Amino acid sequence: MTKAKPQLLHLVFGGELSSPGGVEFKDLKKLDIVGMYPNFADAKTAWLAKAQATVDSAQTRYFVAHIHRLFEMEEEPQQDAED
C-alpha cells in the first residue's frame, strides 16, 4: 500500500490594493477568491494565470497563502487588537 502525500492546502486570492507598494486591499468586499489548492504547484499555476491576466493593472495583485501552515501552529494565535 502506498502512503498518500499529505494535503498541503494553499489559497489563491487577490484584488485591487490601496497603493501599488502595499499589501492592503482597497475594498475587501471585492476580494477575488480564486480557490483552494491541494499543493503549491497547483496554486502557483492558478496564481500565475491571474497575475498575468491583470498585468496591466499596477494596483491589482494576487497572493498564495499557505493555509496548511495554520494547522501546524503549536501555540494559539494571538488575538487582534480589535477583538
Image: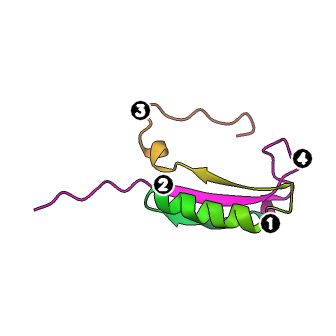
Under circle 4, the secondary element is loop
Magenta stretch: give its range: 1-29
Which is more N-terminal, label 2 or label 4?
Answer: 4
Q: Which residue is mark 3?
A: 74
The answer, for residue 18, to whether it is visible in the render is yes
Q: Quadrant of the C terminus?
A: top right
For label 2, count other residues whose C-alpha is less than 10 Å away and answer few (under 14), some (14-19) or many (20+).
some
In this view of the protein, can residue 32 be seen by the observer? no
Residues packed near mark 4 inside 10 Å, few (<14), some (14 to 19) or many (20 plus):
few
Q: Residue 21: give x, y in percent of width and height.
A: 84, 41
Q: Is residue 38 above or below residue 22?
A: below
Dot 4 amino acid type:
Ser
Tags 4 and 2 in contact by the CB under 8 Å rule?
Answer: no
Q: Which mark is residue 30?
A: 1
The residue identified by callout 4 is 19
> Disc 3, disc 1: CB below 8 Å?
no
Q: CA distance from mark 4 to mark 1?
A: 16 Å
Q: Is residue 61 left or right of residue 72?
A: right
Residue at 89% x, 46% y is 19
Q: Which mark is residue 7?
A: none
Q: Mark 4 and 1 residues: CB-CB less than 8 Å, in contact?
A: no
Pointer 2 residue: 40
